[in-house]
Amino acid sequence: MKALGPIPPEFTAKEGELAIGGRTASELVKEAGDTPLFVYSRAIIEQRIGDLRKAMPERLKIHFAMKANPYGLLLEFMADLVDGLDIASAGELEQAREAGYLPREISFAGPGKRDRELFAAIRAGVTLNLESANEAERALQIGKQLGIAPRLAIRVNPPFELRGSGMKMGGGAKPFGVDADRVPTLARTIVDAGANWRGFHIYSGSQALDAEALIEAQGHVLDLAAQLAGEAGVEVPHLNMGGGFGIPYFDKDTPLDVAAIGVALEKRFADLPGVLKDTQFAIELGRYLVGEAGVYLTRIVDRKVSHDTTYLVTDGGLHHQLAASGNFGTVVRRNYPVAIATRFDAEPEEEVNVVGCLCTPLDRLADAAHLPRAEVGDLVAVFCAGAYGASASPATFLGQGPALEMLV
């Protein structure tokens, strides 16, 4: 058997079934009208953000990284809970505006921004996190054409990485950001050109569960921002310190100690260099805010045995849950938290493989999992589905189409 990841403790049983927002999985599927279905819990998101605010210094703003989950109703809900939104395309900008976010609450990062995206961002008044000197030149020129001083920050490619991160965003050659040694000259150019200078965005990695590694990285971010500002002779109105806060997906993963991070950051904020005394600080989080609040529900449509191995074949799969299938950057495939939603309080009694409906052996949701006996019609729950699920998976593969989504 292969161990399953830890189910977030907020989920409990009701009438023998998994309950989300006080309602059973069967009730939610009936309301939605079909499976597969993503369900996101308002209560879990509110609790996560509330606990985070209590742990972090008061002056630290919390931004939501929209790429984690751009579901419209969830975006609208998040607007009242966070201080800003980080986007990565003109499409996301349009969705953000429709969800009610103000331009000054939005920052736009990502390499390869097209001129029409720069036009849209500058016209709207959002902050552009510039990824290169070329992008800066184009943004300044577009600002002149529009008669608008563009809101510009520099995304820095730092000379360090976040230790133990699942995805490293610094520490060497990267397509993201401007190499640190080139930042002072570019910052000076932007300020001298009359732009609305907004500071730095320094992101070194993601999905870390080691508080000490994050504390170390945040210290490096503060030191680097002060150094670059001093060399450029500019102020730092705003510093996006990046994110990196991870969630437990796999067996033996443990929750991140955010309290320790908050204590360390409070100490650093109490002893800032002069150039950062008036800086507004923010962290940019996606999966940490919404990942554990989401559940993917998929129905078993077949139960079969092949060479003494039992397969539970579902109507879902990697086209909605690419990460859970192990095909979203995972080197060694491990099981996400998975349960039989309609037998949530039953004891495990058999070893099964849970697979999807696609014509590929890559379509796996759980390997050699120890689960309660399940039959055709039962619902399977894949947890930690609130981030990089529906929008980060190939929904149109084999003509399957997207899953349904609900916020409860």
Image (tube, rainbow, N blue to C red):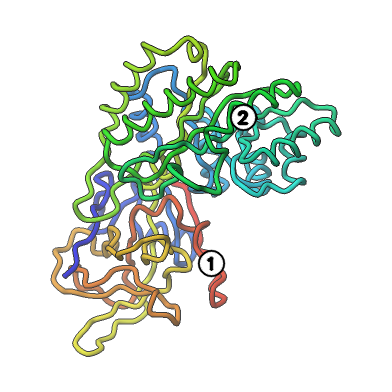
Q: Quadrant of residue 44?
A: top left
Q: Is 133 on the left or on the right of 356, as rendered?
A: right
In the rendered image, residue 152, in percent from the top left (x then y), is placed at 66, 29
Q: CA distance from mark 2 to mark 1?
A: 34 Å
Picture residue at 44% right of the left edge, 12% below the top:
273
Helix, strand or loop status at disc 2: strand
User: What x and y, as percent, mark residue 184?
Assistant: 59, 26
Residue furthest bottom as drawn:
307
User: Is residue 81 in view from this perspective?
Assistant: no
Circle 1 sits in a helix, a strand or a loop, which is it?
A: loop
Q: Earlier in the sequence, mark 2 or mark 1?
A: 2
Classify residue 159 by image quadrant: top left
Label 1: few (<14), some or many (≥20) within 10 Å? many
Residue to which mark 1 is pinned: 395
Eye-nearest disc, 2 or 1: 2
Comparing 167 with 231, the one in front is: 231
The answer to whether residue 145 shows anywhere in this view is yes
Residue in the image at 50% along x and 58% along y: 392
Q: Which residue is mark 2?
A: 153
393 in relation to 222, above or below: below
Residue 2 percent location from the top left of the image:
19, 67
Amino acid identity at mark 2: Ala
In the image shown, does 196 or 187 lie closer to the viewer? 187
Q: Give amino acid for label 1.
A: Ala
